[in-house]
Image: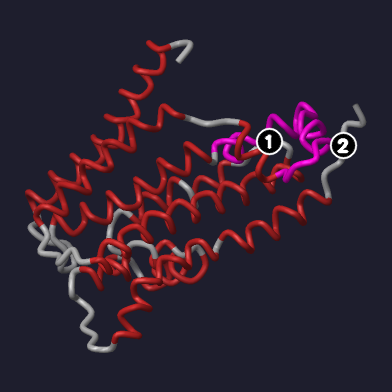
């Protein structure tokens, strides 16, 4: 809040840039009523979930997203000397509160979708929605960690990681079944975006019929696979950290 005008302008930009993306989606549906059987409100639900997860992860995971200067300037040495988890220190090293603009826009789109969708909002449905958002946050943070790990070898961050962050966000704002099978499999079994928005959405919309309570609970818990994605990312991060060459200062 030291530079409030800058904060407000950046938040304003963060609101309207993704908003224009949703406007393009809205205009697309004015020409085509459905895409592979999905209407505007169902796609808006996907959009809202994935953008909420992305905006929260950018806010709290910015330390990993902008990790390369710590390696390039030797600043990571100071983190290693402190008696605290290196992951926790990097997460707390930088917060990007201007992402509140993107977050508010995403919440508005999600609310717009919920109003027009015939979803029975019982406790299980609300819990599923919460798990979808939480799972998305963890997936993006995991990808940020993988991108930061590459910096131990490349020094500078590489744009290839944006294929998984920005690319994954853009792909996952639509239901995955509109894409070829290879893309669906990659973004379900490798980078599990499909389990935090596509599969749970099928369950919420009643497109998957189940009379078994156990199966129903499994669909509710499916987005938690996004949390599980972080654990191999942490393992890879620790592997990269062992290869870090200190500046010796």
Q: Could you tell me which quadrant the C terminus lies in?
A: top right
Q: Quadrant of residue 37?
A: bottom left
Q: Quadrant of residue 89?
A: top right
CB within 8 Å, label 1 to label 2: no
Q: Position of residue 75 (x, y in %)?
A: 77, 28
Q: Earlier in the sequence, mark 1 or mark 2?
A: 1
Q: Is residue 2 left or right of residue 175?
A: right
Residue at numbered disc 1: 156
**Vertical placement of residue 163 versus 12, above or below:** below
- Label 1 vs label 2, nearer the camera: 2
Kindly identify the residue that appears in the image at 18 percent across and 69 percent down: 205
Q: Position of residue 242 (x, y in %)?
A: 83, 51
User: Could you say whether the residue bearing mark 2 is in a helix, strand or loop?
Assistant: loop
C-alpha span from label 1 to label 2: 16 Å
**Vertical placement of residue 136 versus 58, above or below:** below
Depth check, front residue: 146 or 104: 104
**Vertical placement of residue 186 versus 114, above or below:** below
The colour mode here is: secondary structure
Kindly identify the residue that appears in the image at 56 percent across and 41 percent down: 159
Q: Quadrant of residue 156?
A: top right
Q: Is residue 9 left or right of residue 28?
A: right
Task: Confirm whether the magenta stretch covers residue 65.
Answer: yes
User: Could you say whether the residue bearing mark 1 is in a helix, strand or loop?
Assistant: loop
Q: Could you tell me which quadrant the N terminus lies in?
A: top left
Q: Main secondary structure of the magenta part?
A: helix
Which residue of the protein is positioned furthest toward the front in this rendering?
123
> Which label is found at residue 246?
2
- Crowding at mark 1 (Cα within 10 Å: few <14, some 14-19, many 20+): some
């Amino acid at each position: 809040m030291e530079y409030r005008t800058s904060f407000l302008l950046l938040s304003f930009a963060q609101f309207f840039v993704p908003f224009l993306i949703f406007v393009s989606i809205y205009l697309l549906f004015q020409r085509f009523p459905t895409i592979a059987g999905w209407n505007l409100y169902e796609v808006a639900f996907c959009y809202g979930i994935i953008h909420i997860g992305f905006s929260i992860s950018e806010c709290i995971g910015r330390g990993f997203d902008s990790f390369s200067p710590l390696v390039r300037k030797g600043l990571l040495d100071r983190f290693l000397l402190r008696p605290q988890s290196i992951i926790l220190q990097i997460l707390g090293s930088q917060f990007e509160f201007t992402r509140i603009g993107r977050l508010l826009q995403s919440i508005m789109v999600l609310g717009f979708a919920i109003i027009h969708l015939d979803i029975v909002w019982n406790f299980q449905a609300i819990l599923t929605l919460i798990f979808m958002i939480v799972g998305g946050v963890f997936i993006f943070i995991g990808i940020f960690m993988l991108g930061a790990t590459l910096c131990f070898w490349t020094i500078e961050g590489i744009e290839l990681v944006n294929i998984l962050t920005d690319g994954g966000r853009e792909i996952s704002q639509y239901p995955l079944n509109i894409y070829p099978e290879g893309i669906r499999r990659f973004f379900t079994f490798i980078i599990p975006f499909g389990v935090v928005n596509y599969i749970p959405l099928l369950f919420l919309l009643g497109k998957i019929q189940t009379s078994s309570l156990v199966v129903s609970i499994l669909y509710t818990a499916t987005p938690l696979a996004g949390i599980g994605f972080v654990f191999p990312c942490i393992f890879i991060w620790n592997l990269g950290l062992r290869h870090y060459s200190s500046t010796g200062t």
